Image: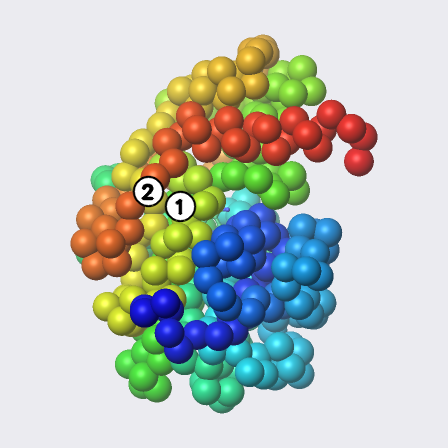
Amino acid sequence: MGHLDGIRSVLITGGCGFIGANLVRFLRAETPWEVRVLDNLRTGRREYVTDDLAQVHEADAGDADALRTALDGVDAVVHLASTTGVLPSVEDPAMDFDGNPATTFRILDACRRSGTERFVFASSGAALGDAGTVLHENLPPRPLSPYGAGKLAGEAYCAAFAGSFDMHTVALRFSNVYGPFSMHKQNAIPNFIKALLRREAIEIFGDGQQSRDFIYVDDLCRGIMLALTSPAAKGEVFQLATGIETTIAELVTLIGDAVGSDQEIVYHPRRSGEVYKSRADISKVTGTLGYEPNVPLSEGLSRTVEWYRDRLAAPA
Ligand SMILES: NC(=O)c1ccc[n+]([C@@H]2O[C@H](COP(=O)([O-])OP(=O)(O)OC[C@H]3O[C@@H](n4cnc5c(N)ncnc54)[C@H](O)[C@@H]3O)[C@@H](O)[C@H]2O)c1
């Protein structure tokens, strides 16, 4: 397996969540690694990760005893567990501090103690804030929300643990991720798909011209795998995105096409703490890790809609 040599077992914190449930499946399909999950099921769903896929430890990722057990024999960690979302962090910044940067520090430190050297951290474009330009790694970060500040702090600790303890840490600034296993998410794509399939009105906050860089979850998972295994990734920060900007209005049209129907749109005022335009320059991740996004938005949306259609057709 060449570049995959050296890793036999990987722990995914937050593995029962949206990205985690997809990553468990991706790594089981693409690598020979044993996959373990540590999740307190705050937002994730136990049934997203069946026992044949991974050993699931149900505990808080900031808990020292749970971490020690979960890290035993593990060569690499993908740290996804976090309080998520800009709005909850604006409503309760102290809660975000505990669940985001404080937890990241505790896991990194537990990895240092247990000798688990490879660590990939789920950061976010929110670490940069409303840059007013295309996002890239050389921009000075100025987070707009506590959530973004917590991600930036996590990036700083990743760099410091590479610098001080020679760990292979990598921070990946995910753009807006979408795909299956996202029923519990309150993001634009899950909300629009659910509304269309249930024949309910679509709600847009703002004028519909705000934009995002939407990445299909399998493309994101490939980027995570490359970050875990590429020597050139050590201690670095990468924007992990597609480089393509789509407005919310365009997104609604594409999802309508994938579902095969359209609905009334209700507009609400723009929400505070949210950036208006967002697209990433991905030249660093493509140049350094050989990463390429493969799944076009229309294709990713139809795969996602199919997943929702199966689950919303029969009452849960
Ligand atoms: N989805 C996106 O578009 C996006 C974009 C940028 C960054 N991210 C980051 O990616 C990561 C995963 O996001 P997601 O969309 O899959 O969210 P999610 O809420 O679906 O998954 C998070 C998982 O972590 C678990 N969790 C949360 N706090 C925990 C704790 N203290 N201990 C143990 N488990 C805990 C939850 O139960 C859940 O299963 C997060 O760190 C998030 O900030 C996501």
For disc 2, the neighbor class at 10 Å (few under 14, some 14 to 19, many from 20) is: some
Image point (55%, 69%), residue name? 34
Which amino acid, by three-letter code, is at mark 2? Pro
Which amino acid, by three-letter code, is at mark 1? Asp
Question: Under tag 2, what secondary structure?
Answer: loop
Nearer-the-camera pick, 174 or 211 = 174
Name the residue carrying label 2: 293
For disc 1, the neighbor class at 10 Å (few under 14, some 14 to 19, many from 20) is: many
Disc 2 to disc 1, C-alpha distance: 5 Å
Quadrant field for ligand 1: bottom right
Image point (36%, 54%), residue name? 223
Asked which quadrant contains residue 15, the reply is bottom right
Tell me whether circle 2 and circle 1 mark residues in contact (CB < 8 Å).
yes
Image point (46%, 87%), residue name? 115
Q: Position of residue 9 (x, y in %)?
A: 52, 73
Judge left or right: residue 17 versus residue 30.
right
Specify whether residue 276 is in view: no
Q: Position of residue 30 (x, y in %)?
A: 46, 56
Image point (54%, 33%), residue name? 304
Asked which quadrant contains residue 219, the reply is top left
Residue that extends furthest to the front in the rendered view of this protein: 1
Nearer-the-camera pick, 80 or 5 = 5
Judge left or right: residue 195 versus residue 87.
right
Q: In the rendered image of this protein, does residue 237 appear above or below residue 8? A: above
Asked which quadrant contains residue 236, the reply is bottom left
Which comes sooner in the sequence, label 2 or label 1? Answer: 1
Q: In the rendered image of this protein, does residue 110 appear above or below residue 29? A: below
Q: Position of residue 267 (x, y in %)?
A: 53, 18
The tag on residue 22 is none
Name the residue carrying label 1: 219
Q: Position of residue 266 (x, y in %)?
A: 57, 16
